[in-house]
Protein backbone atom coordinates (compact mmCIF):
# COMPACT_ATOMS: atom_id res chain seq x y z
CA UNK A 1 0.00 0.00 0.00
CA UNK A 2 1.01 3.57 -0.60
CA UNK A 3 3.14 5.32 2.01
CA UNK A 4 1.76 8.43 3.55
CA UNK A 5 5.00 10.39 3.90
CA UNK A 6 8.35 9.28 2.48
CA UNK A 7 11.43 11.08 3.76
CA UNK A 8 14.43 11.28 1.45
CA UNK A 9 17.57 12.48 3.23
CA UNK A 10 20.41 13.82 1.12
CA UNK A 11 17.78 14.77 -1.43
CA UNK A 12 20.01 17.35 -3.13
CA UNK A 13 22.75 14.77 -3.78
CA UNK A 14 23.18 12.77 -6.97
CA UNK A 15 21.14 9.74 -5.93
CA UNK A 16 18.87 11.97 -3.87
CA UNK A 17 17.90 13.92 -6.97
CA UNK A 18 17.21 10.70 -8.86
CA UNK A 19 15.00 9.44 -6.03
CA UNK A 20 13.26 12.78 -5.69
CA UNK A 21 12.26 12.65 -9.32
CA UNK A 22 11.25 9.00 -9.39
CA UNK A 23 9.87 7.85 -6.04
CA UNK A 24 7.00 10.30 -5.75
CA UNK A 25 4.48 7.61 -6.69
CA UNK A 26 5.33 5.61 -3.54
CA UNK A 27 3.80 8.15 -1.16
CA UNK A 28 1.14 10.79 -0.79
CA UNK A 29 3.89 13.23 0.14
CA UNK A 30 7.65 13.45 -0.11
CA UNK A 31 9.64 15.13 2.63
CA UNK A 32 13.04 16.13 1.30
CA UNK A 33 15.94 17.02 3.51
CA UNK A 34 19.51 18.18 3.00
CA UNK A 35 21.80 20.90 4.25
CA UNK A 36 22.42 21.95 0.65
CA UNK A 37 20.06 23.76 -1.72
CA UNK A 38 16.93 21.82 -2.68
CA UNK A 39 15.38 24.43 -4.95
CA UNK A 40 11.65 25.02 -4.85
CA UNK A 41 9.20 22.50 -3.44
CA UNK A 42 7.18 20.91 -6.23
CA UNK A 43 3.65 19.55 -5.97
CA UNK A 44 3.49 16.97 -3.18
CA UNK A 45 6.89 17.92 -1.73
CA UNK A 46 7.93 19.36 1.58
CA UNK A 47 11.45 20.74 2.04
CA UNK A 48 13.30 20.65 5.35
CA UNK A 49 16.86 21.92 5.77
CA UNK A 50 18.53 19.77 8.37
CA UNK A 51 22.02 18.64 9.29
CA UNK A 52 22.08 14.99 10.36
CA UNK A 53 24.33 15.78 13.33
CA UNK A 54 21.58 18.00 14.79
CA UNK A 55 19.71 15.58 17.06
CA UNK A 56 16.67 17.77 17.74
CA UNK A 57 16.27 18.72 14.09
CA UNK A 58 16.46 15.06 13.01
CA UNK A 59 13.88 14.14 15.66
CA UNK A 60 11.46 16.60 14.10
CA UNK A 61 12.43 15.64 10.55
CA UNK A 62 11.50 11.98 11.01
CA UNK A 63 8.15 12.63 12.78
CA UNK A 64 5.20 11.40 10.75
CA UNK A 65 7.23 9.60 8.08
CA UNK A 66 6.32 5.96 7.42
CA UNK A 67 9.16 5.49 4.95
CA UNK A 68 12.73 6.79 4.85
CA UNK A 69 15.30 6.58 2.08
CA UNK A 70 18.45 7.57 3.91
CA UNK A 71 20.94 8.84 1.37
CA UNK A 72 22.21 11.71 3.49
CA UNK A 73 25.67 11.96 4.99
CA UNK A 74 29.26 11.95 3.79
CA UNK A 75 29.45 9.88 0.58
CA UNK A 76 33.22 9.45 0.14
CA UNK A 77 36.33 9.25 2.31
CA UNK A 78 36.89 12.33 4.51
CA UNK A 79 38.49 13.35 7.81
CA UNK A 80 37.14 11.40 10.77
CA UNK A 81 35.41 14.44 12.28
CA UNK A 82 33.36 14.86 9.10
CA UNK A 83 32.48 11.16 8.94
CA UNK A 84 31.62 11.09 12.64
CA UNK A 85 29.20 14.01 12.48
CA UNK A 86 27.31 12.98 9.35
CA UNK A 87 27.50 9.18 9.34
CA UNK A 88 28.01 8.13 12.97
CA UNK A 89 26.09 10.70 15.01
CA UNK A 90 23.79 11.18 12.00
CA UNK A 91 22.68 7.55 11.79
CA UNK A 92 22.13 7.27 15.53
CA UNK A 93 20.06 10.45 15.44
CA UNK A 94 17.97 9.01 12.61
CA UNK A 95 17.27 5.68 14.36
CA UNK A 96 16.56 7.31 17.69
CA UNK A 97 14.06 9.53 15.92
CA UNK A 98 12.55 6.49 14.19
CA UNK A 99 12.24 4.66 17.51
CA UNK A 100 10.49 7.60 19.16
CA UNK A 101 8.27 8.48 16.22
CA UNK A 102 4.53 7.83 16.46
CA UNK A 103 4.73 5.89 13.17
CA UNK A 104 7.52 3.35 12.77
CA UNK A 105 9.16 3.94 9.41
CA UNK A 106 10.55 1.32 7.07
CA UNK A 107 14.06 2.43 6.13
CA UNK A 108 16.38 2.14 3.16
CA UNK A 109 19.95 2.73 4.28
CA UNK A 110 22.43 3.66 1.56
CA UNK A 111 25.36 1.52 2.63
CA UNK A 112 28.29 1.07 0.28
CA UNK A 113 30.61 -1.46 -1.30
CA UNK A 114 33.30 0.27 0.77
CA UNK A 115 31.99 -1.68 3.78
CA UNK A 116 33.58 -4.73 2.10
CA UNK A 117 36.15 -2.92 -0.07
CA UNK A 118 39.24 -4.81 1.06
CA UNK A 119 37.99 -8.13 -0.25
CA UNK A 120 39.93 -8.99 -3.38
CA UNK A 121 38.21 -9.06 -6.73
CA UNK A 122 38.81 -12.81 -6.97
CA UNK A 123 36.44 -13.34 -4.01
CA UNK A 124 32.70 -13.87 -4.30
CA UNK A 125 30.64 -12.32 -1.53
CA UNK A 126 27.14 -12.70 -0.19
CA UNK A 127 25.23 -11.09 2.66
CA UNK A 128 27.11 -13.22 5.21
CA UNK A 129 30.62 -12.32 4.10
CA UNK A 130 32.66 -10.47 6.68
CA UNK A 131 32.95 -6.73 6.42
CA UNK A 132 36.32 -5.34 5.35
CA UNK A 133 35.95 -1.55 5.27
CA UNK A 134 38.50 0.34 3.21
CA UNK A 135 38.53 3.66 5.10
CA UNK A 136 36.65 5.62 7.76
CA UNK A 137 33.88 6.08 5.21
CA UNK A 138 33.57 2.29 4.88
CA UNK A 139 33.79 1.92 8.66
CA UNK A 140 30.87 4.33 9.01
CA UNK A 141 28.79 2.21 6.60
CA UNK A 142 29.56 -0.93 8.64
CA UNK A 143 28.48 1.05 11.71
CA UNK A 144 25.26 2.10 10.01
CA UNK A 145 24.46 -1.52 9.12
CA UNK A 146 25.12 -2.50 12.74
CA UNK A 147 22.80 0.23 14.01
CA UNK A 148 20.09 -0.96 11.60
CA UNK A 149 20.56 -4.54 12.84
CA UNK A 150 20.32 -3.52 16.50
CA UNK A 151 17.18 -1.43 16.00
CA UNK A 152 15.63 -4.33 14.13
CA UNK A 153 16.41 -6.91 16.80
CA UNK A 154 15.50 -4.66 19.72
CA UNK A 155 12.60 -2.62 18.33
CA UNK A 156 11.46 -4.33 15.12
CA UNK A 157 12.37 -1.42 12.86
CA UNK A 158 12.90 -2.80 9.36
CA UNK A 159 15.81 -1.62 7.20
CA UNK A 160 17.19 -2.61 3.84
CA UNK A 161 20.91 -1.88 3.89
CA UNK A 162 21.95 -1.56 0.27
CA UNK A 163 25.68 -1.89 -0.31
CA UNK A 164 25.60 0.33 -3.35
CA UNK A 165 28.31 -0.43 -5.89
CA UNK A 166 28.83 2.43 -8.35
CA UNK A 167 25.54 4.13 -9.14
CA UNK A 168 26.22 6.43 -12.06
CA UNK A 169 24.69 6.89 -15.51
CA UNK A 170 27.40 4.57 -16.85
CA UNK A 171 30.51 2.81 -15.52
CA UNK A 172 33.43 5.25 -15.48
CA UNK A 173 36.23 2.66 -15.45
CA UNK A 174 36.85 -1.07 -15.74
CA UNK A 175 36.28 -1.78 -12.03
CA UNK A 176 32.77 -0.41 -12.40
CA UNK A 177 31.94 -3.11 -14.96
CA UNK A 178 31.60 -5.22 -11.79
CA UNK A 179 30.15 -2.64 -9.39
CA UNK A 180 27.85 -0.63 -11.64
CA UNK A 181 24.24 -0.07 -10.57
CA UNK A 182 21.93 1.66 -13.02
CA UNK A 183 19.56 4.33 -11.75
CA UNK A 184 16.65 2.25 -13.05
CA UNK A 185 17.76 -0.83 -11.08
CA UNK A 186 18.24 1.27 -7.93
CA UNK A 187 14.71 2.64 -8.24
CA UNK A 188 13.31 -0.85 -8.91
CA UNK A 189 15.05 -2.11 -5.76
CA UNK A 190 13.68 0.67 -3.56
CA UNK A 191 10.19 0.04 -4.93
CA UNK A 192 10.50 -3.66 -3.94
CA UNK A 193 11.74 -2.73 -0.45
CA UNK A 194 8.54 -0.80 0.22
CA UNK A 195 6.32 -3.37 -1.54
CA UNK A 196 7.22 -6.59 0.28
CA UNK A 197 4.94 -7.46 3.21
CA UNK A 198 7.83 -8.37 5.48
CA UNK A 199 11.26 -6.82 4.95
CA UNK A 200 13.30 -7.78 7.99
CA UNK A 201 16.80 -6.33 7.99
CA UNK A 202 18.55 -7.58 4.86
CA UNK A 203 21.90 -6.63 3.36
CA UNK A 204 21.62 -6.29 -0.39
CA UNK A 205 24.40 -5.71 -2.89
CA UNK A 206 23.37 -2.82 -5.08
CA UNK A 207 24.64 -3.83 -8.50
CA UNK A 208 22.94 -4.37 -11.85
CA UNK A 209 22.93 -7.77 -13.57
CA UNK A 210 26.58 -7.38 -14.53
CA UNK A 211 28.36 -10.38 -16.07
CA UNK A 212 31.50 -9.36 -14.11
CA UNK A 213 29.75 -9.10 -10.74
CA UNK A 214 31.41 -10.30 -7.51
CA UNK A 215 28.23 -10.33 -5.44
CA UNK A 216 25.52 -12.86 -4.79
CA UNK A 217 22.08 -11.67 -3.67
CA UNK A 218 20.48 -15.12 -3.30
CA UNK A 219 19.85 -14.41 0.40
CA UNK A 220 17.44 -11.64 -0.54
CA UNK A 221 15.62 -13.35 -3.40
CA UNK A 222 12.40 -12.91 -1.36
CA UNK A 223 12.46 -9.22 -2.23
CA UNK A 224 11.65 -10.12 -5.82
CA UNK A 225 14.19 -7.64 -7.13
CA UNK A 226 15.53 -8.56 -10.54
CA UNK A 227 18.06 -6.05 -11.85
CA UNK A 228 17.40 -5.52 -15.57
CA UNK A 229 20.50 -3.67 -16.73
CA UNK A 230 24.05 -4.84 -17.35
CA UNK A 231 27.36 -3.00 -17.58
CA UNK A 232 28.38 -5.18 -20.54
CA UNK A 233 26.73 -2.76 -22.94
CA UNK A 234 29.42 -0.21 -21.97
CA UNK A 235 32.44 -2.53 -22.17
CA UNK A 236 33.43 -1.81 -25.76
CA UNK A 237 33.15 1.93 -25.22
CA UNK A 238 35.29 1.72 -22.04
CA UNK A 239 37.92 -0.39 -23.81
CA UNK A 240 38.06 2.18 -26.57
CA UNK A 241 38.46 5.15 -24.21
CA UNK A 242 40.85 3.83 -21.55
CA UNK A 243 43.39 1.17 -20.71
CA UNK A 244 42.25 -1.40 -18.18
CA UNK A 245 44.15 -1.08 -14.87
CA UNK A 246 47.41 -3.02 -14.62
CA UNK A 247 47.39 -6.21 -12.52
CA UNK A 248 48.64 -4.63 -9.28
CA UNK A 249 46.57 -1.44 -9.53
CA UNK A 250 44.14 -1.25 -6.56
CA UNK A 251 41.38 -0.87 -9.14
CA UNK A 252 42.27 -4.37 -10.35
CA UNK A 253 43.01 -5.96 -6.97
CA UNK A 254 40.40 -4.80 -4.47
CA UNK A 255 36.63 -4.60 -4.71
CA UNK A 256 36.80 -1.11 -3.20
CA UNK A 257 39.37 0.00 -5.78
CA UNK A 258 41.40 3.12 -5.05
CA UNK A 259 39.63 3.69 -1.70
CA UNK A 260 41.95 0.90 -0.49
CA UNK A 261 45.15 2.76 -1.34
CA UNK A 262 43.88 6.11 -0.08
CA UNK A 263 45.47 7.32 3.17
CA UNK A 264 43.81 8.78 6.24
CA UNK A 265 42.43 12.23 5.47
CA UNK A 266 43.65 14.37 8.33
CA UNK A 267 41.58 17.38 9.28
C1 LIG B 1 30.79 5.13 -2.99
O1 LIG B 1 30.47 4.72 -1.88
C2 LIG B 1 30.74 6.56 -3.35
O2 LIG B 1 29.69 7.24 -2.71
C3 LIG B 1 30.66 6.77 -4.85
O3 LIG B 1 30.93 8.12 -5.13
C4 LIG B 1 31.60 5.86 -5.62
O4 LIG B 1 32.93 6.19 -5.31
C5 LIG B 1 31.32 4.43 -5.25
O5 LIG B 1 31.35 4.23 -3.87
C6 LIG B 1 32.27 3.44 -5.92
O6 LIG B 1 32.88 2.63 -5.21
O7 LIG B 1 32.37 3.45 -7.14
Image (cartoon, rainbow, N blue to C red):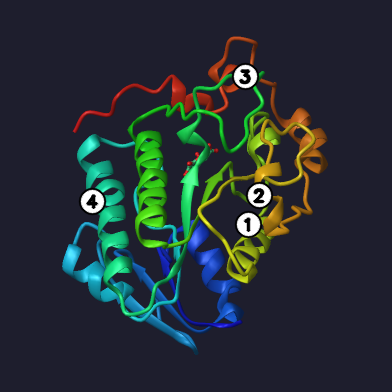
The image position of residue 112, as x and y in percent, is 49, 42
Label 4 to label 3, Cα distance in Å?
A: 34 Å
Question: Which residue is located at x 78 percent, y 30 percent?
Answer: 240
Query: Real-space Cα distance between discs 2 and 1?
Result: 15 Å
Residue 248 locus on image (x, y percent): 59, 10
Taking the view exactly as shown, the residue that stands out farthest to the front is 154
Indicate which disc, 3 or 2, sits on the residue closer to the N terminus: 2
Q: Nearer the viewer, mark 2 or mark 1?
A: 2
Contact between labelled residues 1 and 4, with CB atoms less than 8 Å apart: no
Q: Quadrant of the N terminus?
A: bottom right
- Estimate the spatial distance between the alpha carbons at disc 2 and disc 4, rounded to whole Å: 29 Å
Element under disc 1: helix
Compute the Cα span from label 4 to label 1. Answer: 26 Å
- Residue at label 1? 186
Query: Which residue does the numbered mark 4 point to in the structure image?
Result: 89
4 or 1: tag closer to the N-terminus: 4
149 in relation to 51, above or below: above
Give the number of the mark in front: 2 or 4. Answer: 2
Amino acid sequence: KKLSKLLITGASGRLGSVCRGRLGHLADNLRLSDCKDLGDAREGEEIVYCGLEDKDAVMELVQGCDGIVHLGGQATEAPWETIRAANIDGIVNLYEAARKSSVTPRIVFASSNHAIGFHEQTERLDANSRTRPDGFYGVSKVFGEAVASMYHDKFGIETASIRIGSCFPEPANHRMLSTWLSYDDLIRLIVRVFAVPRLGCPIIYGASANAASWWDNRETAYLGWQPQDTSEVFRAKLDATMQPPSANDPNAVYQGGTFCSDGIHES
